[in-house]
Image (cartoon, rainbow, N blue to C red):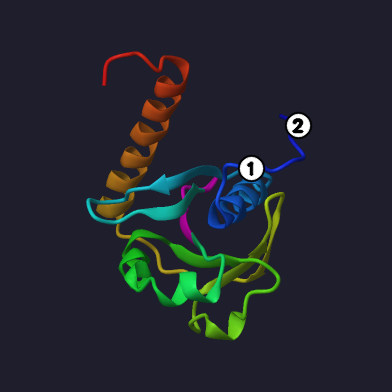
């Protein structure tokens, strides 16, 4: 499949996540989609920056997608910065003040606003960074050897 065409099997939020990940990678962030910082929580994009910063990005493809999801406040404790990623037609006035904002599509994203930086505690940062690394390594191993031990 050509790299410039979005895969037809991806849902709208996943296409936004793809653009967000591409943008963050261009700024030297390592990214994971659908990352679980702790049991019961799953963020759309977790990004680990070149200085060890951890960002969470939640991708919302529509008003209904946003209004039907109230779990986002529980993600604030797992990031130095929190962002919403939406497409250019999304009614951004719905998004809470004090959060970051990205406008994205399947190919890229732009950061329109940074939310406040709230540094994670050292112990949480260490545990979360280790979880991120293990998760990334296990995903890579699963791609390289799908039939391997689980």
- Bounds of the magenta segment: 49-57
Q: Earlier in the sequence, mark 2 or mark 1?
A: 2
Neighbor class of circle 2 (other Cα within 10 Å; few <14, some 14-19, many 20+) is few
> On the image, numbered disc 2 is attached to which residue?
2
**68 left or right of 111?**
left
- Mark 1, secondary structure of its residue: loop
Q: Is residue 114 magenta?
A: no
Q: Of residues 27 and 62, which is closer to you in this image?
A: 62
The tag on residue 56 is none
The tag on residue 8 is 1
Neighbor class of circle 1 (other Cα within 10 Å; few <14, some 14-19, many 20+) is few
> Can residue 102 be seen from the camera position used here?
yes
Q: Nearer the viewer, mark 2 or mark 1?
A: 1
Q: Residue at x 65, y 46 (%)?
A: 22
Percent position of residue 129, x then y: 36, 43
Quadrant of the rendered structure where residue 79 is? bottom left
Residue 50 vertical placement versus 112 (above, below):
above
Q: Residue at x 42, y 47 (%)?
A: 34
Quadrant of the rendered structure where residue 141 is? top left
> Can residue 116 be seen from the camera position used here?
no
Residue 61 vertical placement versus 97 (above, below):
above
Q: Of residues 100 and 53, which is closer to you in this image?
A: 100
């Amino acid at each position: 499949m050509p790299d410039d065409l979005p895969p037809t099997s991806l849902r709208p939020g996943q296409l936004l996540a793809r653009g967000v990940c591409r943008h963050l990678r261009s700024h030297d962030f390592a990214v994971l989609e659908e990352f679980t910082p702790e049991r019961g929580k799953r963020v759309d994009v977790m990004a680990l920056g070149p200085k060890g910063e951890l960002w969470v990005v939640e991708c919302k493809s529509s008003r209904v997608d946003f209004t039907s999801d109230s779990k986002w406040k529980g993600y604030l404790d797992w990031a130095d910065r929190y962002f919403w990623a939406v497409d250019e037609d999304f009614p951004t006035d719905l998004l809470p003040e004090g959060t970051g904002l990205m406008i994205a599509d399947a190919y890229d994203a732009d950061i329109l606003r940074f939310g406040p930086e709230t540094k994670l505690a050292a112990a949480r940062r260490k545990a979360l960074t280790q979880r991120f690394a293990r998760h990334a390594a296990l995903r890579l191993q699963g791609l390289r050897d799908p039939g391997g031990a689980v």
